[in-house]
Image (tube, grey):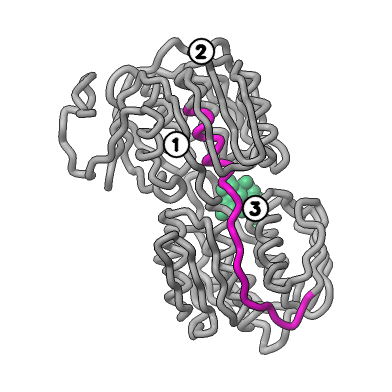
Amino acid sequence: MDKLIIRGGRRLEGEIRISGAKNSALPILLSSLLTDERVIISNVPHLHDITTSLTLLGNMGAEVVIDEKLNVEVDPSTITSQTAPYELVRTMRASILVLGPLLARHGRASVSLPGGCAIGSRPVNIHIRGLQEMGADIVVENGFIEATTHGKRLQGAEIDLGMVTVTGTENLMAAATLAKGTTLLHQAAKEPEVVDLANYLNTLGARIEGAGSDHITIHGVEQLTGGHYRVMPDRIETGTYLIAAAITGGRVKLKDTDPTLLTVVLEKLQETGATIRCGSDWIELDMEGKRPKAVDLVTAPYPDFPTDMQAQFTALNAIAQGSGKITENVFENRFMHVQELQRMGAKIELSGSSVTVHGVESLTAAPVMATDLRASASLVLAGLVARGNTVVDRIYHIDRGYETIEEKLAQLGASIRRVPGNYKGQVVREGSASE
Ligand code: UD1
């Protein structure tokens, strides 16, 4: 397993481009199972989770071709299997997104039940209930979700999701595109990735209205066609690099992104004292060499503060002036990065679903280990300002969601490098990592 070695203390400056959104690309690629015609998806990020999705599609018999510009062409007309095996679902929970499309298009699906994960129990009961309300027969046995429509089309239904679930909304919305009649989803997730998926499906001939609001209406059609779609920019990657600039007192410009996707995050960054300028597809953050001010925040579904940015703000608060309280309301166990940050000298008190972070002047390098994707990002951010060489282990988590993070950070002037898992160099002593 590779590690990252980061020598802290450099102010980041420069420009980088933001990749396509992981959380859009995944449902978009997987819902290609709804059609029989070729689709071409561009701006797909080069990430482990994308490779897993393409492997999943390939295992089912779809033909997948990737060109040199990373446009992904999927031909789902050759599908022979409707199974998502444990080996793949285990490494990527979003594999559950094949359930709705397979049932809607092929009338059956066998999907390994995703287990709990580092950030909480993460059940999929709402996905299952929604599909049952659309007429599917679903049992869970031997660790698999076994679903069938008994050869019939799914039926449009009025479904109250009961709580906001992003992939739950995506699964049901995708399935409903081919259902007989109209489906109404109440308490739908309003995340921009849901809107991106709806726009994609509509380019294939689906009739989805209201995506981005609490109520989505899907008028079922007989079939979807092929098409070409460009994935939206990654708002979480964008936010992470903005924090990289803020935490180091630097100035960075991010291109190929969309400031309208990050309103609350940009407001919080302004509260830290950063100056932010935006154009239609770029954002520049300038911290002018200052130390950021600590902020309070509470995570909640979009358009409120994203849980996927919580760990990065915890790292920012760790070196900020003052104290900030961070409350996590989406997942029950999403503070696994706190103990690692404490090992780097952060002063953080954990109490239930909140942490209070008392900013310190500087952190010190330590070997740290990541437990999930965004937690890993927070450790890299902390490493950028820690004295000495921070070694972040288990970075396969980062590779799931950040395209070439070490190259992008190096382009902004960070001292960072990737080493193989068996690396035994003297990495903790300051100055020992070669630049
Ligand atoms: C998606 C994102 C993830 C993000 C999360 C919340 C993808 C691939 N992943 O995950 O990056 O952190 O949204 O913004 O898009 N829940 C249930 N029953 C269900 C489904 C969900 O109880 O059937 C609960 C979950 O345990 C959690 C909450 O709902 O507490 C929100 O989870 P959800 O929105 O479903 O997260 P994901 O879609 O898995």
Q: Position of residue 288 (x, y in %)?
A: 52, 14
Q: Is mark 3 within 8 Å of ligand 1?
A: yes
Residue position for label 2: 291
Q: Is mark 2 within 8 Å of ligand 1?
A: no
Q: Amino acid at mark 3?
A: Glu
Label 3 crowding class (10 Å Cα cut-off): few <14, some 14-19, many 20+?
many
Q: Are marks 2 and 3 in contact (CB under 8 Å)?
A: no
Give left or right: position of 93 versus 304.
Answer: left
Are circles 2 and 1 on residues that touch, CB within 8 Å? no
* Span of residues in magenta: 220-244
Q: Which residue is mark 1?
A: 377
SS at badge 3: helix
Q: Would you call the spot at circle 2 few (<14 residues within 10 Å), some (14-19), or many (20 or more)?
A: many
- Residue at x 49%, y 42% (from the top left corner): 17
Query: Where's residue 159, x and y in %?
Result: 80, 64
- Left or right: 227 as drawn, with respect to 83: right
Residue lying at 42% horizontally and 69% vertically, measured from the top left: 55
Residue pointed to by mark 3:
193
